């Protein structure tokens, strides 16, 4: 090994030590590494990037929130192994996560985000999971001028308040069921009557508020409407009314627990709707645990394993591709957590990726420069396209990411499997109607 290579190896070791300590300048090279020093215009400075958020280690959002957190952890793990986030001036940022259990409670979210900002002195924020909790966190981040990247929050209302520091990775709720209606009518234009059943939370309400007029505009008649309280799992009080309305299709839902219970009830009560599309629950791998009640259920998803966004997709759109490929994400997640990723997992990773790209593009951790980078972001990642509104009222709202739709179908082996059925260019199977 030459003296130059020995010196370079020594510098690499010193860089790792600096990463562990944070904020340390690499020592001046010795004479034997003069060649390497000449190529370096500025000394490397390694700093800790403190990223804060809350997750639901308990409460109604525990399952999806855990998946989202796992995605974030995978992103940090990969960035760390790659030597950190490298800025143009030679600064290397080593990400550190600071997070607490919010118990799926909005008041606790606000307390903890205040703590993250004032006590933990985090540099940037990621969001909790679920629109209600994201909204609570956004109020705190905006009041304190902290940049927050949100995953797990699709509520339109949150992103229509003129916020300046909050950026939404997910497609907004207004897009969640419109694609399902398109897919349904493409397969069977004779469907005419639709029932809407939804949770009363802000996210679910925003979804059906957009879906109802869209359904009517497509010639559908809304023959039944019912909303239910968060946490509901007994749908008996209105199921007979639903059956009497004889809908061809049922759309709505809310989150994992209630959505799973609703799908199971529709099956057990033999509701004869040919098409059912519910929010949040169907894309979760555990949805199949309800058994035959899962068959034929369609769910909107932010991302699914079979959907392949890549550099060619980006090139066709004239935008840059950033980060790893979809299959690399899936295999890395599987290896780390011994389970397949859900779209919640992908969303958590994507939130970190978007922050990383903004930091690299800005070349700084200065919030104003990072915000300027986010405002002009238009990129493709394994998660899909990301672009934010810069209008005053809807600033930070996601305007480019597209939904995909899955359906639980039985294969020739009689086992339930999740298939991508819409859009047609991404499908792994044809959409099926219940007979």
Image: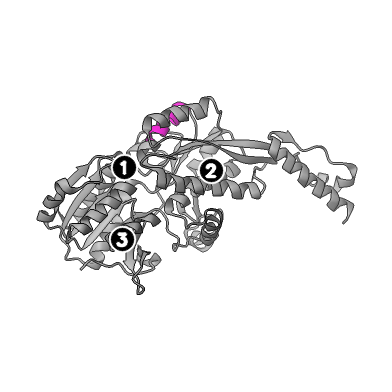
Please provide percent x and percent y for residue 293. 27, 60
Among numbered discs 2 and 3, the one appearing first in the sequence? 3
Q: How far apart are marks 1 and 3 (CA)?
A: 27 Å
Please provide percent x and percent y for residue 433. 24, 66
Please provide percent x and percent y for residue 155. 34, 42
Query: Colour scheme in the image?
Result: one colour
- Is the magenta region chiefly helix, strand or loop? helix
Q: In terms of depth relative to the viewer, which is nearer, 264 or 381? A: 264
Q: What element carries label 1?
A: helix
Q: In terms of depth relative to the viewer, which is nearer, 239 or 273? A: 239
Q: Is mark 3 on a helix, strand or loop?
A: helix
User: From this viewpoint, which residue is outermost toward the left?
Assistant: 244
Please identify the quadrant where the C terminus is shown: bottom left
Please identify the quadrant where the N terminus is shown: bottom right
Is there any visible trace of residue 326 in the rendered image? yes
For disc 1, the marked residue is 203
Residue 142 in the magenta stretch? The answer is: yes
For disc 2, the marked residue is 355
Residue 3 in the magenta stretch? The answer is: no
Among numbered discs 1 and 3, the one appearing first in the sequence? 1
Q: In terms of depth relative to the viewer, which is nearer, 304 or 164? A: 304
Q: What stretch is highlighted in magenta?
A: 135-144
User: From this viewpoint, which residue is outermost toward the bottom?
Assistant: 412
In the rendered image, the vertical position of residue 369 relative to residue 269, given as above or below: above
Q: Residue at x 74, y 40 (%)?
A: 17
For disc 3, the marked residue is 291
Q: In terms of depth relative to the viewer, which is nearer, 186 or 377? A: 186
Question: Is the Cβ of the residue at disc 2 closer than 8 Å to that at disc 1?
Answer: no
In the rendered image, the vertical position of residue 422 relative to residue 19, given as above or below: below
């Amino acid at each position: 090994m030459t003296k130059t290579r020995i010196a370079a190896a020594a510098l690499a070791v010193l860089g790792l030590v600096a990463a562990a300590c944070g904020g340390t300048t690499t020592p001046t090279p010795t004479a034997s590494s003069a060649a390497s020093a000449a190529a370096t215009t500025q000394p490397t400075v390694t700093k800790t990037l403190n990223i804060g958020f809350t997750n639901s280690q308990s409460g109604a959002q525990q399952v999806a929130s855990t998946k989202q957190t796992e995605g974030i952890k995978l992103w940090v793990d990969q960035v760390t192994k790659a030597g950190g986030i490298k800025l143009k001036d030679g600064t290397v940022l080593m990400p550190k996560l600071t997070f607490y259990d919010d118990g799926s409670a909005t008041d606790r979210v606000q307390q903890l985000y205040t703590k993250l900002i004032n006590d933990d002195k985090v540099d940037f924020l990621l969001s909790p999971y679920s629109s209600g909790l994201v909204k609570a966190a956004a109020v705190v981040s905006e009041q304190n001028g902290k940049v927050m990247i949100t995953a797990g929050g699709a509520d339109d209302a949150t992103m229509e308040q003129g916020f300046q520091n909050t950026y939404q990775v997910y497609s907004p709720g207004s897009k969640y069921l419109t694609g399902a209606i398109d897919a349904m009518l493409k397969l069977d234009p004779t469907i005419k009557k639709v029932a809407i059943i939804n949770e009363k939370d802000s996210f679910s309400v925003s979804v059906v508020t957009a879906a109802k007029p869209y359904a009517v505009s497509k010639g559908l008649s809304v023959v039944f409407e019912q909303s239910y309280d968060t946490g509901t799992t007994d749908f008996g009080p209105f199921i007979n009314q639903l059956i009497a309305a004889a809908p061809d299709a049922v759309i709505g839902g809310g989150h994992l627990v209630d959505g799973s219970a609703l799908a199971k009830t529709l099956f057990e009560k033999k509701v004869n709707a040919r098409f059912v599309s519910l929010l949040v629950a169907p894309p979760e791998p555990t949805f199949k645990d309800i058994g035959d009640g899962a068959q034929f259920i369609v769910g909107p998803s932010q991302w699914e394993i079979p959907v392949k966004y890549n550099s060619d997709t980006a090139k066709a759109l004239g935008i840059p591709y950033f980060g790893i490929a979809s299959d690399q994400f899936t295999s890395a997640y599987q290896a780390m957590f011994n389970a397949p990723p859900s779209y919640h997992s992908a969303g958590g990773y994507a939130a970190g990726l978007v922050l990383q790209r903004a930091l690299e593009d800005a070349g700084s951790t200065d919030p104003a420069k990072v915000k300027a980078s986010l405002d002009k972001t238009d990129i493709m990642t394994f998660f899909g396209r990301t672009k934010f509104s810069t209008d005053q009222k809807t600033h930070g709202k996601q305007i480019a990411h597209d939904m995909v739709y899955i359906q639980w179908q039985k294969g020739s082996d009689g086992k339930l499997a999740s298939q991508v059925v819409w859009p047609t260019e991404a499908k792994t199977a044809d959409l099926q109607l219940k007979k």
